[in-house]
Amino acid sequence: MSVAQLQSRHLVLFDLDGTLVDSAADLYRAMNLSLTKLGLPLVTEAQVRVWVGKGAAKLCEAVLSHLFGQVDAQQQAQLLSTFMQVYAQELCVDTQVYDGVLPFLEYCQAHNIAMACVTNKPEHLARGILDVLELAPYFKMVVGGDSLAERKPHPLPLLHCVEQAGITTAETLMIGDSSNDVEAARRAGIDCIVVSYGYNHGESIYDCQPQQVVDRLAELV
């Protein structure tokens, strides 16, 4: 039986990168531009695809760990600030909406199910991507990694949306792509479906025992 049970949901929470949009190509480009600026060796897109999924700080950590076998705190701070600057300038060159996402968003909209985007990306960057890809009108709320005191896998961002919507956790569904999403939903007491195509830091999404995995969001309708 599908976990979705959309007829009893009033709110669907979505992760952004790896769930709604494939942003790895732009993250890769911004990372190599940043490394070039700092005079450091470059990385490959395949490597970046393995390292994304847990926020920019973790991405920078993974890059430095790969390049030097260890992470110097000062160097990480420098890479992170350079990366955020470079990435913010060109958020959406190659970033695309995943196949199967739009029919699902349209279904929720047509059935008066509210939608929120809950991401660990800084809120202004998340809103920038949603705007460029014309997804912004679907989302009543956008919660970024810097919007509240905690970020995923802490349950607070999810529970904040539930509270804002004035509903219960039972009427809410989370859709994500990484162990961060699964853990946040589990701690919030919210049902969670994950997509098979996203980013999970190179680990199998099945390792965190998700309730359900789908290949395309359109399958849920």
Image: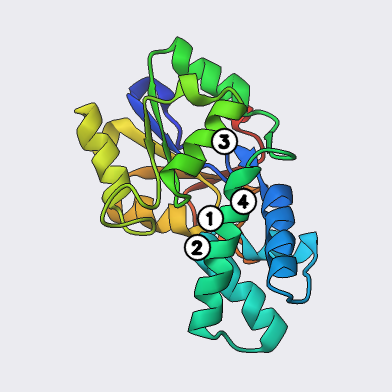
| Numbered tag placed on residue 178 in the rendering | 1
Secondary element under disc 4, as helix, strand or loop, is helix
Q: Which of marks 1 and 3 is in front?
A: 3
| Numbered tag placed on residue 129 in the rendering | 3
| Numbered tag placed on residue 208 in the rendering | 2
Residue 139 higher or lower than 122, as above or below: above
The residue most toward the bottom is 69
Residue that badge 4 annotates: 87
Viewer-proximal residue among 201 and 45? 45
Q: Nearer the viewer, mark 4 or mark 1?
A: 4
As measured in the structure, the alpha-carbon distance from the residue carrying label 2 to the one carrying label 4 is: 30 Å
As measured in the structure, the alpha-carbon distance from the residue carrying label 1 to the one carrying label 3 is: 20 Å
Circle 3/circle 2 CB separation < 8 Å: no
Q: Of marks 4 and 1, which one's residue comes earlier in the chain?
A: 4
Amino acid found under the numbered disc labelled 3: Ile
Q: Of marks 4 and 3, which one's residue comes earlier in the chain?
A: 4
Secondary element under disc 3, as helix, strand or loop, is helix
Q: Which of marks 2 and 1 is in front?
A: 1
Q: Nearer the viewer, mark 2 or mark 4?
A: 4
Secondary element under disc 1, as helix, strand or loop, is loop
Residue 168 in view here? no
Circle 2/circle 4 CB separation < 8 Å: no
Neighbourhood count class around disc 1 (C-alpha, 10 Å): few under 14, some 14–19, many 20 upward:
many
Neighbourhood count class around disc 2 (C-alpha, 10 Å): few under 14, some 14–19, many 20 upward:
few
Amino acid found under the numbered disc labelled 1: Ser
- Rendered location of residue 17, percent (x, y): 58, 46
Instruction: Write down the quadrant of residue 114 in the picture.
Output: top left
